[in-house]
């Protein structure tokens, strides 16, 4: 329940900001990922949802890579706010 309350607080803050910003897009993808993950725990053989989850994960990863290259401080803040892991460095 704490994750949902955190997400709702963040979403209220983000509604006032630019919806095209990288942070907002990553936030939306994170919500979708969490929803699909809980769905797939119940429906293990839903391969369409698995494919959709992989696509969304890739999009979020590309956005996070872009943000980490452009502004490391905003990237770190977003990672901490959403409670997700950092990108792997090559």
Image: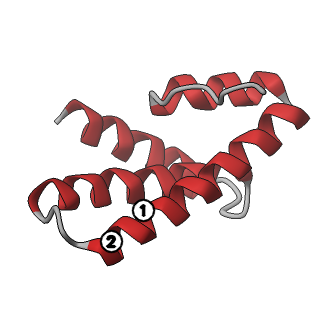
Along the line of sight, the residue nearer the viewer: 68 or 4 = 68
Q: Secondary structure at mark 2?
A: helix
Label 1: how many Cα within 10 Å (few below 14, some 14–19, many 20+): many
Residue ranking furthest to the right: 70
Q: Residue at point 87% right, 34% down? A: 69
Q: Residue at point 70% right, 42% down? A: 64
The percent position of residue 19, horizontal first and vertical second, equals 66, 63
Residue 86 lies left or right of residue 53; in this view the side is right
Q: Which of the image's four quarters has the C terminus?
A: top right
Q: Which label was assigned to residue 49?
A: 2
Colour setting? secondary structure
Along the line of sight, the residue nearer the viewer: 35 or 88 = 88
Quadrant of the image occupied by residue 70: top right
Q: Secondary structure at mark 1?
A: helix
Answer whether residue 45 is visible to the viewer in this image: yes
Residue identified by numbered label 1: 53
Residue 40 lies left or right of residue 54; in this view the side is left
Label 2: how many Cα within 10 Å (few below 14, some 14–19, many 20+): some
Residue ranking furthest to the bottom: 48
Q: Residue at point 37% right, 43% down? A: 7
Residue 70 lies left or right of residue 79; in this view the side is right
Along the line of sight, the residue nearer the viewer: 85 or 76 = 85
The percent position of residue 73, horizontal first and vertical second, equals 78, 22
Q: Spatial distance from mark 1 to mark 2, Cα to Cα?
A: 6 Å
The percent position of residue 88, horizontal first and vertical second, equals 66, 27
């Amino acid at each position: 329940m704490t994750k949902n309350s955190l997400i709702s607080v963040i979403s209220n803050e983000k509604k006032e900001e630019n919806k095209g910003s990288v942070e907002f897009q990553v936030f939306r993808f994170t919500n979708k990922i969490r929803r699909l993950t809980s769905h797939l725990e119940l429906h293990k053989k839903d391969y369409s949802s698995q494919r959709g989850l992989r696509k969304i994960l890739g999009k979020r990863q590309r956005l996070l890579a872009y943000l980490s290259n452009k502004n490391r401080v905003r990237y770190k803040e977003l990672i901490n706010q959403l409670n997700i892991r950092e990108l792997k460095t090559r």
